[in-house]
Image (cartoon, rainbow, N blue to C red):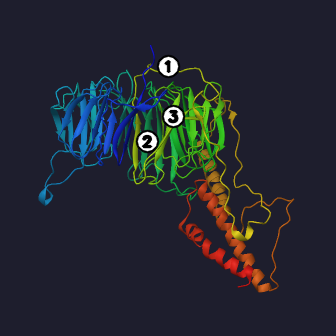
Amino acid sequence: MAPPMPLLAVRGSDGLHMIQGPPNIASFEPFQRDLSKNCKVCKFSKDGKLFAWCNGDVTNIVNTADSKLLHTFDLPKVVGLEISPKNTILATWQTYITGKDGAAGVPNLQLYDVKTGKCVKSFIQKKMENWAPRWSVDEKICARNVNNEVHFFENNNFDTIANKLHLQKVSDFELSPGEHPCKVAVYVPGTKGAPSFVRLYQYPNFTGPQSAIANKSFFKADRVMMLWNSKATAVLVTASTDVDKTGASYYGEQTLHYIAVNGESAVVQLPKNGPIYDVVWNKNATEFCVVYGFMPAKATIFNLKCDPIFDFGTGPRNAAFYSPQGHILVLAGFGNLRGQMEVWDMKNYKLISKPTAADATFFSWCPNGEHIITATCSPRLRVGNGYKIWHYTGSVLHKYDVPNNTELWQVSWQPFADGVFPAKPIILQPVEGEIPAEENKPAQAYRPPALRNKPVTNYKLHEEEPPQTTKPQSTDKPLSKSALKNQKKREAKKAAKQEAKVDEPAEPVLQVSQNIAPTSITTGDPETDKKIKNLKKKLKAIEQLKELQASGKPLEKNQIDKIQKEDALLKELEDLELGD
């Protein structure tokens, strides 16, 4: 029996439609295109059997197999949708509006029975952040964060709160995935010198001093991101501060913590100083990938002992994406980077391809584990909107550019249950019939007009490290707390010094090749020559700042101001050289 062809929902300013594929890409005719210019949100169910959307007039839910309409709800302003794991409940969220004279508004979070279409419960949920209820995979438990407590409902009975988890100011929680006894990870931010902490509980054991099955406390956390592995045996916690007090990073400071349900915990030691851009678990639940460090960023695979087992070296990247089957990993640089991707075979740690998706703002794996989609969407980028469907070997199966004056807002693959698409053997050659990706010529550094006919100065801002297998160092004696603290101080000081050197225009870090003799232009007037020399020095510094900006490093306001003066400096230089 041939595997199913996934659907792709495409939402934009020209409405909502669906296509079907790969392997072949075609419009999905059973789904009638919604031409509304105000489709604010759309959502597939976890198993992909249902699809819901709001078009600005009503909210609809359909079967994906034949697009048969199940229900239409008179909800024109829905901006949040969620479908429970077994397709029992449809949750909708609309912006909360207070009543007259500051009175409480009407409930804005509704829960509907998908079978009958009736509303079974309404709540007031003021903030959109974490608005959606969280269900266990069997729907025996549903949880919400309410006034610094976590409220639990059982078997979708929302009239009675079955349990409460109360800690001082619980600000976030995550239920464990999969068919396991349900566990809960909760985060409590620190106050008045007390540390923040994450605790793990097994439902419904919340009371008593020994109720927590694991606990990890830490300082330097304004917010956290908690990530369970697929087998619910461990959680990765990325703790972030808004400001890095060492001054080494514009992004604040991040640390990565590992907490296992057996009570073990550790700080994941990252060999390179700088921000943590992305943390992802492999589907096998035995390894995770971290992308981190000042650009060019490192990427490393760690095992459950938090030992590094493979280092991908450094490169222009800020994201990582495992295939749904876990057999392929894509490292990518999106956003303010140039869209370079590295596709890796995770069994042999072998590089498969290096395609480039310029200006991409979105990436997602197709459920078949063979294709990916990259898209340029508004409002992140309002020009050049569209998407490409690629094979992991780097060939392009399908390309779509939106018409002029039209915006693309979202593309979403239809999900499938585990096992529908088993992993296939990895191939290294592009698939026959697909279009090879165009060769991407490396962008040339900007050269002012006065330097365009002169010899090129060779320089490199960063030396990239090659990939390497890492032998776990689990037998080494771990560093003491004070030694770790001193090591971090030294690294931060070193990074701050390096950044100060790069930012200082008076001493550019351009390494001139010894084989190239420096050229100079003399006008006969020493004063004019001096001005020309100073202008060239400033333009070189601006060129260098632009390179840093292109590599993903955020610039200070004074550095951006310098870049904006480039045109005026070029004009002044040309006038001096021409003797005007």
Which label sits on residue 372? 3
> How many neighbours does mark 1 have within 10 angstroms: few (below 14), some (14-19), or many (20 or more)?
few
- Position of residue 572 relative to residue 541, above or below, is below
Q: Nearer the viewer, mark 3 or mark 1?
A: 3
Which callout, 3 or 1, points at the residue further toward the start of the chain? 3
Foreground mark, 2 or 3, reads 3
Q: Earlier in the sequence, mark 2 or mark 1?
A: 2
| Residue type beneath disc 3 | Ile
Q: Relative to 234, is 440 on the left or the right?
A: right
Element under disc 1: loop
User: How many numbered markers are drawn?
Assistant: 3
Which numbered dot is residue 422? 1
Inter-mark Cα distance, 2 to 3: 25 Å
Task: Check disc 1 and give the amino acid type.
Answer: Pro
Of the numbered discs in the image, which one, if any, rests on residue 225? Answer: 2
Question: Measured from the top left, where is residue 320 in percent x and y?
Answer: 54, 38
| Residue in the foreground of this view, choosing between 145 and 548 | 548
Q: Quadrant of the C terminus?
A: bottom right
Give the mark nearer the N terminus: 2 vs 3. 2
For the residues labelled 2 and 1, say whether their Cβ atoms are less than 8 Å apart. Answer: no
- Quadrant where the N terminus sits is top left
Q: Secondary structure at mark 2?
A: strand
